[in-house]
Image (cartoon, rainbow, N blue to C red):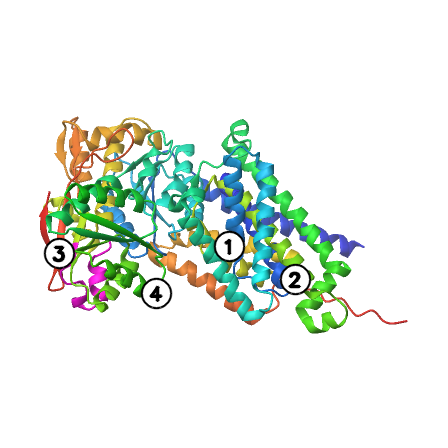
Amino acid sequence: MANYLTFIATIGGIYALLALSLNLAWGTVGLVNLGLVGFFAVGAYASAIVTAIGVPVVGGIVVAMLAGVVAGVIVTFATLRLRDDYLAIVTLGFAEVVRIVALNERWLTNGADGISGIVTPLRQTLGGRGFDLFYLGLVTLIVVIVWFALRRLDLSPYGRALKSVREDQELAAFAGKDVMRLKFEAFALSAAIAGLAGALYAHFQSYVSPDHFQPLITIYVFLAVTAGGVGRPIGAVFGAYAVVAFMEATRFLADLPFLEPVQVAAMREILIGLSLALILLLKPTGLLPEKTPKATVQP
Amino acid sequence: MTIKNTSISRRGVAKGAAVLAVATALGGGVAFAQDGPIKLGALVPLTGAGGPYGPIMAKTMQAVVDEVNEAGGVKGRKLELIVEDTQTNPEAAVRAARKLIEVDGVISISGTWASSVTTAVAPLAWQSGTFLTTTSGADSITQLPHEGYLIRTQPNTTLQGRKFGEFAIEEGAKSVYMVSPQTPFVDSQFENITKAVEAAGGTTELLVYDDKKPSYRSEVDTVMRADPDAIILGGYTPDTTVMLKDLYRAGYDGLKIGFGYSVNEKLLESVPADVVEGAMTISPSPNADSKAYARVGELSGMANPDPYTAQVYDQINLIILSLAASDAEPSGTMLKDTVRTVSQGDGETVDNAIDGIKLLSEGQAVNYDGASGPVDFDEKGDITDSRFRYDQVQDGKIVLLKIF
């Protein structure tokens, strides 16, 4: 049981990084990114590929973040004129492009077989149990650092500028903000965090394949951010852990004697959808909503 | 001041109680008695792309376990089957497998279906000493460093490819076109089809499509331009359904050959009869005349059980027989060391666990021949048997042509 909880907490941390990434793009600067899983995949594959040719894991993680930035910049370029629904559709397309490239470019990604035997740092020295604990510590530490950095960013003048783009980009431009640059920077940073999450996932599981990166993950992360509170980093982190805990807790419905396994599986999906609907109905701003600072009184 | 203190201590008590309650709940979950039921895991695709197969696979395994329990269990111990959903997604499957291994403490996991799922779960199995039985076909799976903790009941794709090629030639086709989604086995399959067809002086072409497209009109146009004598359908049920409809619309009237697991009763129900009329299927032959296969039909409620259901029936029977055959404490290691003594050899042939348990308790050796075939394994975990069955859709029904 303790092993399992360690594992779930680690996966929760990786989801929390994805949620922080989405919260930055969607919650802070207002760019709906339905292609989150694509950046996650880019990071996972980038690190898996470069560590396979001898780069140390730390290097792999850096490469994964850079790959995320490059992908983020490309997507922002492609979507400069798009907002809202249109942007969402294009980013959704981007994630599918990544998945299909990973499926078909066998020389690079080994196709549908996926890349197995990815380096798991220190596993040999620490043993299975030790590795799980070490990795939980590592992922949690990174979540705390990224959360803290994003919180600082939120509270800074730069963060206010990003939020002004979210609220009204014409007005932000009118006030002298370089809207395009802000969008580029925020989206690239967001993509780097998703890439980081991907690298951490790859080195934890030691196997990635195109099947891993289905749009379902993006939906779970949207659920996490919505439930936690759009626009507030701690909300995203809380939401991510809550969603993973909820998904795992619903497994134990199988203990109810009157449900068949297939009904339990369907029930889990119903409950996840239902809980999102309920949160949106009862607490549309999320469980830890964004705090809007009071306007300063002019002297 | 006093009031404040009291309120804090009251809260403390409440917190303590809550922590205790949680701890008890968790503790209760892991309580593990040495003489409790032996826990077996089933990890099948109940939702996602494998959704058409998983529920019946789980139901069939549960039925076998129930039967054995009614007959007294194994050495006086009951069996418990714990079913989890892979969601046909390796990420979700790993979470499910961790739960099975670390919370439930299962000694085996059966029925992983998608190759990516099996590849993701396999390291957990050999690291934790859990025995994994799978229906995935990718050649790479048995080449993993699994130390014997993995067996599969599905023939690998090299062999399947050759059978498709030979069959197309037998049916008089000279030009063969294979259409398939991107799968771990499309390349090795096509390579082996080509070998067989070219040996007889024919030609082959391959078109790989995306399995999630709603229409394959452009793909069908490409295929029709080549005017092939035979089209080999390499996909699964959902995409093959769409492909067959588009081929029918385009007026293709040549030979269509698909996998038995994709051109199945579900597909027949979901399309007009004309669309699939005459289509041929090849599948690793379940022992269609065997009692075991008939039994799978009863347990699963299908007239022609798909090969996966037949395979998981055999997997769970083999695990139960292995438990009965060894005196060691039940564990994954014990299963991997014992399974080949009941799956093959000179023992009395049996086709179900209950008969086998009886013979084993009398000190006799057994050799299990099941619903999917003789299920004998080589040292890598691949089956050594190679019989295939050939069916054709005639008047909206799947009719057996031959088995060899």
Circle on res. B392: 3
- For label 1, the residue is A37
Q: How many marks?
A: 4
What chain does badge 2 belong to? A
Residue A294 to residue B90: above or below: below
- Rendered image: mark on residue A183: 2
- Is residue A287 left or right of B159 when viewed as pictured? right
Q: In the displayed structure, does residue A57 sit left or right of residue A162?
A: left
The type of residue carrying mark 2 is: Lys
Contact? badges 4 and 1 (CB < 8 Å)? no
- Whole-angstrom CA distance, mark 4 to mark 2, is 34 Å
Give the number of the disc on residue B214: 4
Q: Is mark 1 on a helix, strand or loop?
A: helix
Badge 2 crowding class, 10 Å Cα cut-off, few under 14, some 14 to 19, many 20 or more, is many
Q: From which residue to which does the magenta span run? A: B261-280
First of labels 1, 2 by sequence position: 1
- Give the amino acid at mark 1: Val
Residue at figure coordinates x 66%, y 60% from the top left: A232
Say which amino acid is labelled 4: Pro
Q: Residues within 10 Å of mark 3 (few under 14, many from 20)?
A: many
> Can see residue A231?
no
Q: Is residue B377 magenta?
A: no
SS label for mark 2:
helix
Q: What element carries label 3?
A: strand
Name the subunit of mark 3.
B
Q: Is residue B278 magenta?
A: yes
Contact? badges 3 and 1 (CB < 8 Å)? no
Give the image location of residue B300, x and y in percent.
Answer: 21, 53
Q: Nearer the viewer, mark 3 or mark 2?
A: 2
